[in-house]
Image (cartoon, rainbow, N blue to C red):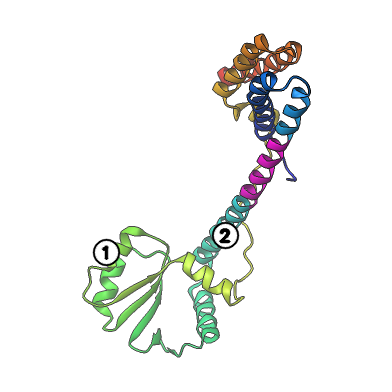
Amino acid sequence: MKNLSFSFILDAIFLFLGSFLLFFIPLSYILEEGATIFCLLLSILTVILFIKLANKRKLKQNLNKKELITIENFKTYLLVQKKEKIESLICALLDKKGVEYKKEDRIYIKNTTLLINFALTKLDLLKTAYEVKEDLLIFCLENNELFSYSKLFTKKITLVTEKELYFALKEENLLPPLPSLFKKKEGLNLKNIFYGLNLKRLFLISISLLFFSLFTPFKIYYLIFSFIFLSLFITSLILKRV
């Protein structure tokens, strides 16, 4: 994992200490010698397994997040481009798919009229359904209310959302360049990192380490880590109150 967040490192430390405690307490009674080393190895294996699983999940989340950002950029592109530009893009898609169509004042596919309106409202839909005799295929932004409303008409009205258009264009390698118009989020500073910490978790970790220090020969190490987590808890609490 290339970028490890501060909270992820804390989770890994807590998992290591927690798993060591869980393994050490029963194994110290079962094994007369080597319990500490055996517990350390098991704890390290637990952390390695945790990192691998977290890495797979993080990779999947990053891919999904990247795709969502691209779709948002595509949505912005549709809103700012001229209708003719989008129309030519859709015609190129129809050509690539091998769909026969006729282009006059509007685009016609058999007995269906194709319309492009990414600012479509219920009133627009009502007027269009009244004026156009054929079935309708309308490219618009995703809107559950419009989708439900379109089902009320006697004629067939199909709404194609920006996401469906995006994936159709992507499949045929027809996606246009999508320059981002918005700034990327700035990286977190130290204060923001402390804001993101879970106060309850830090406090529970500190108290747990302090409690288990009473039952282990490694008392000094538990006390040190308990002090570290307690310091993080106090620092984060103060920053959130300021």
The reply to whether callout 1 and callout 2 are in contact (CB within 8 Å) is: no
Task: Tell me the tag on residue 149.
Answer: 1
Q: Earlier in the sequence, mark 1 or mark 2?
A: 2
Q: Is residue 187 left or right of residue 120?
A: right
Task: Tell me the tag on residue 73.
Answer: 2
Q: Is residue 167 left or right of residue 114?
A: right
* Residue 49 belongs to the span the image colors magenta: yes
| Amino acid marked by disc 1 | Tyr
Q: Which is more toward the observer, 201 or 91?
A: 201
Where is residue 157 drawn, in percent x and y?
Answer: 31, 74
| Residue interval drawn in magenta | 45-59
Residue 229, image quadrant: top right
Quick one: quadrant of the C terminus?
top right
* Residue 51 belongs to the span the image colors magenta: yes
Q: Is residue 54 above or below residue 142?
A: above
Residue 100, image quadrant: bottom left
Q: Is residue 216 above or below residue 89?
A: above
Where is residue 56 drawn, in percent x and y?
Answer: 65, 50
Q: Secondary structure at mark 2?
A: helix
Task: Tell me the tag on residue 122.
Answer: none
**Residue drawn at the location 39% of the way across and 76% of the way down:** 115
**Residue drawn at the location 63% of the way across and 25% of the way down:** 22
| Amino acid marked by disc 2 | Asn
Asked if residue 183 shows in the view, the reply is no
Where is residue 168 drawn, in percent x and y?
Answer: 52, 73
Asked if residue 67 shows in the view, the reply is yes
